[in-house]
Amino acid sequence: MTMPVEEFLNHIHGEWVRSRSGRTFDNINPADTQDNVGRFQASTAADAEAAVGAAAAAFEGWRKTPIGQRAKVLNKAADYLEAHADRFGLELSREEGKSVALGRDEFLRAAQTFRFYAMEAQTFGGETYPQDDADMVVYSQREPLGVVTVISPWNFPASIPARKLAPALVMGNTVVFKPSSDAPLSGLRLTEALVQAGLPAGVLNFITGRAGDVGPIITTSRAISAISFTGSTQAGMHIQRTVHLTTRLQMELGGKNPLIVMEDADLDQAVDLAVKGGLSLTGQACTGTSRLIVVPQVKEAFTQRLLQRVQALKIGPGTTPGMDLGPLATAKQLETVLSYLEIGRREATLLCGGERLTQGVYAQGYYVSPAVFTDVTPQMRIAREEIFGPVLAIIEAADFADAMAKANDTEYGLSAAIATRNPKYMHAFAQDIQAGTVKINRTTTGNLVNAPFGGVKNSSTSTFRESGRVGLEFFSSTKIIY
Ligand code: NAP
């Protein structure tokens, strides 16, 4: 017997509502395309206008709500996410493909993010300025920007929007939130948590639907004071070209992150960094390792150990405990990754994997076996373009200087790592690598809730970092009072 498919609604001006289009779209499980995770609203420009209008109407009341009350909503929402983390984690696994354990961790991290901003915002004030006039006080204060748009991708459908929503709301902004059409349920759960925690009507408006339909309204409307976007560099560039002059932008975009392996590295650790950084999350992390830049002294030994590890990885649905890799998240991702595997076969030497898996448990999902290419040069497409899949490229570098030149020879600059025991290499790497996040004997993936996060070059806008205290700066402006 097939289960009826649940329909999920938009949340506009405090009400759960259908799209005016009367149309919906399906959220399909990438591990089993027979599994429909839910039916979501195919919103239109009119729905988007209603969401922006509701946020604008709610702004005056929310900005005047005491900070303690705004923080209380975040803390209550965090309680709700923690209480439901098992169920929401399972849903996240079904809509995105990562393991249930990672899905659960994402909701717990979202809760941690809410609590962090609830506390941090209460110490985020202005300054007083010494001056000569005894009859005057000069001070600054932080004010919310107004209506802000949050747009998030499918690969971290809970933790990424959480780190945008929490600072936006606690600073007194009102929000229009559009999650990825490929994993909208986790974003709906965040919204549900905040709504049940007592957020007033219109403060957070959640709409689902194709970027082409709702995107122009929620990005180019004059009412939008700021946009916090995470997604592809291509979509980010499009938004940047079309926004209004006064709309503040923060964008976290693509990556092509290197791991340098030096001659003195602990090779088992280096292999671990490559496998965990490059292949966990099926290579679908913006900070995932995709280029392994290795010096000749250890290239053969590193490659052999890497192949052993990669070939032993367990691939399967995120709902089966103990899997190392899940499916690709969407049919489009599968197509993209398969096309890069083809390109890689023509450009370089495939050492293992790279096969579409279609038998047994894989029959209904978007699975490929993790691929390792060698003889890769920096000019090749698999070394330059973001693949966003389980594909590792080994690039030989003559020495440290050559490794650094190759690591920096990219349009991206999100995250970068080095495996070495030599403090000189560590220091030089930290100084000269062109990346927003630098890891020494750690995976390129992973960042703290309380630390800033973002990249350089085409990986981010050069405006504000997100995460940590700087998230509060992005979502507020400074007023000076004499
Ligand atoms: P995407 O296709 O760019 O979509 C991201 C989000 O933007 C989705 O909600 C999408 O809506 C929306 N969108 C796309 N074009 C838009 C437009 N013109 N106006 C308004 N909204 C628009 O990216 P994705 O495939 O979801 O995510 C993968 C990409 O995100 C990779 O490039 C990855 O590196 C990057 N990423 C970066 C970070 C980081 O922190 N730097 C973190 C995670 C992921 P629809 O779903 O409706 O198309």
Image (cartoon, grey):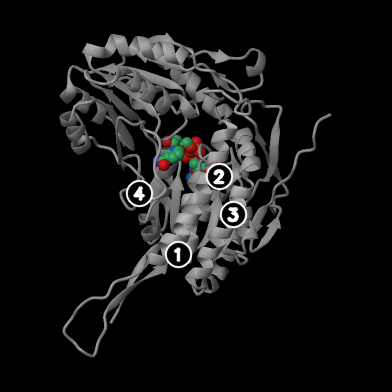
What residue did someone put label 1 on? 171
Q: Is residue 340 left or right of residue 34?
A: left
Disc 2 or disc 4, which is closer to the eye? 2
Callout 2 amino acid: Phe
Q: Does label 3 or label 1 sit earlier along the sequence?
A: 3
- Residue 431: give its label: none
Disc 3 or disc 1, which is closer to the eye? 3
The residue nearer to you, when weighing 387 against 112, is: 112
Task: Write down the quadrant of residue 198 in the picture.
Answer: bottom right
Q: Does label 2 or label 4 sit earlier along the sequence?
A: 2
What residue did someone put label 4 on? 452
The residue nearer to you, when weighing 44 against 148, is: 148
What residue did someone put label 3 on? 79
**Mark 3 vs mark 1, CA separation in Å:** 20 Å
- Number of other residues with Cα within 10 Å of mark 3, as a class: few under 14, some 14 to 19, many 20 or more: some
Q: Does label 3 or label 2 sit earlier along the sequence?
A: 3
What residue did someone put label 2 on? 107
Q: Secondary structure at mark 3?
A: helix
